[in-house]
């Protein structure tokens, strides 16, 4: 018997084959444009929502970092960088959506093509380079965010800002978004902004997080702060992260971002080499991301959002069993489609 919801079957048999004929970045915008249109039409929207089979009960709800989530499945950063699709994403059943990575000023990102499918491995390689419409445009959109959806703000620095002044960029985004988001993700782990990952070292990271926390504590409403880390950190670096969460009083960690590793892929090495630099996501990063979550959970008593290679019920469950409190997906939306929310929820209910 086919166990996945109708929406997932329709996505895999109709939408995905067509979308995969298009350039990946164009397909992203066109498919989401179609979903937005479909979900906004009363009859079609109701049928679409039914086909996605996302119904929740009290049992699915969790409290993490002081926020009450109707269930544990959210959309990872980078999918809706500019907060354009919050209404359709909420209608698809996501409990939370992380917008961004946003930078203070708009920037175009890297030259195209910069997003590639690694189909045989159910993965993606991207070197988008924080293309985004900038802080002010995002704030305007967030003023009209849908009720009931938890929104996280993932923040970074502009490409032209040197690491010595990175703190100013993060603080600008933190201050600007503070009234408009429910939590923050501090992104120091994208492989596509030169030098950014050096900010993951303990000293600059402690200084950066302390600066954000100082502002945070002065506000009427304290926003939970998560640090988003790379899967490529060594055990010693992960130990530093555990210590640093305690030192700075942030709420938790998002594990993980994309990897720079290309190990263990089925796709021929020549094809992978032809793609060039970028972060690899999807099924190939799943095991390492879960390993990082387990390592952190054994050593720290903070909130963990697990992300990396979640594409169905069992892979979502793996993250929770490793110690994650919440789960995010990105590449799974491309390969499984929006029915992924219902599939993951079913997997968590066991
Ligand atoms: C095209 C693309 C763009 C991304 N952009 C961002 C980003 O702007 N900020 C960020 O923190 N993570 C970004 N990510 C990483 C995802 O949020 C996620 O951590 C990673 O893809 C692993 O999850 P997945 O295997 O479910 O895709 C991006 C991923 C992809 C594929």
Image (spheres, rainbow, N blue to C red):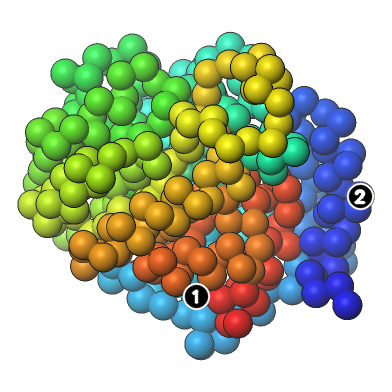
Quadrant including the N terminus: bottom right
Q: CA distance from mark 1 to mark 2?
A: 30 Å
Quadrant including the C terminus: bottom right
Residue under the point 45% across and 48% down:
288
Please state the horizontal and vertical placement of residue 16, each as a whole percent of the image. 83, 45
Please state the horizontal and vertical placement of residue 344, each as a whole percent of the image. 62, 68
Is 273 above or below relative to 155?
above
Residue under the point 73% across and 54% down:
336
Q: Label 1 crowding class (10 Å Cα cut-off): few <14, some 14-19, many 20+?
A: many
Tally of numbered discs: 2
Residue under the point 80% across and 74% down:
3
Tag 1's secondary structure?
A: loop
Pointer 1 residue: 70
Please state the horizontal and vertical placement of residue 69, each as a whole percent of the image. 44, 72
Residue under the point 51% across and 88% down:
58
Please state the horizontal and vertical placement of residue 343, each as a whole percent of the image. 68, 69
Q: Is residue 111 left or right of residue 106?
A: right
Pointer 2 residue: 14
């Amino acid at each position: 018997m086919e166990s996945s919801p109708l929406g997932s079957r329709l996505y895999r048999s109709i939408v995905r084959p067509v979308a995969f004929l298009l350039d990946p970045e164009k397909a992203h915008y066109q498919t989401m444009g179609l979903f937005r249109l479909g979900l906004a039409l009363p009859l079609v929207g109701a049928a679409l929502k039914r086909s996605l089979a996302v119904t929740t009960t009290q049992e699915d709800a969790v409290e993490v970092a002081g926020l009450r989530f109707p269930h544990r499945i959210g959309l990872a950063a980078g999918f809706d960088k500019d907060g354009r699709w919050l209404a359709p994403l909420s209608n698809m059943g996501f409990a939370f959506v992380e917008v961004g990575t946003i930078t203070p000023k708009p920037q175009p990102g890297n030259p195209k093509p910069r997003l590639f499918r690694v189909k045989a491995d159910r993965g993606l390689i991207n070197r988008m380079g924080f293309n985004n419409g900038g802080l002010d445009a995002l704030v305007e959109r967030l003023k009209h965010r849908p009720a009931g959806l938890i929104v996280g703000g993932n923040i970074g620095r502009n490409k032209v800002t040197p690491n010595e002044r990175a703190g100013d960029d993060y603080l600008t985004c933190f201050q600007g978004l503070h009234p408009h988001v429910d939590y923050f993700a501090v992104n120091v782990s994208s492989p596509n902004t030169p030098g950014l990952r050096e900010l993951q070292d303990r000293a600059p990271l402690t200084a950066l997080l302390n600066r954000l926390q100082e502002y945070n504590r002065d506000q009427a409403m304290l926003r939970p702060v998560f640090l988003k880390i790379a899967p490529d950190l060594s055990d010693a670096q992960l130990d530093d992260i555990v210590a640093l969460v305690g030192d700075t009083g942030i709420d938790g960690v998002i594990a993980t971002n994309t990897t720079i590793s290309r190990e263990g892929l089925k796709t021929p090495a020549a094809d992978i080499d032809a793609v060039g630099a970028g972060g690899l996501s999807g099924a190939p990063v799943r095991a390492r991301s879960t390993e990082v979550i387990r390592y952190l959970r054994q050593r720290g008593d903070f909130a963990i959002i697990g992300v990396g290679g979640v594409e169905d019920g069992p892979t979502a469950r793996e993250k929770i069993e490793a110690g994650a409190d919440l789960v995010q997906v990105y590449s799974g939306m491309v390969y499984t489609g929006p029915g992924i929310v219902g599939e993951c929820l079913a997997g968590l209910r066991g």
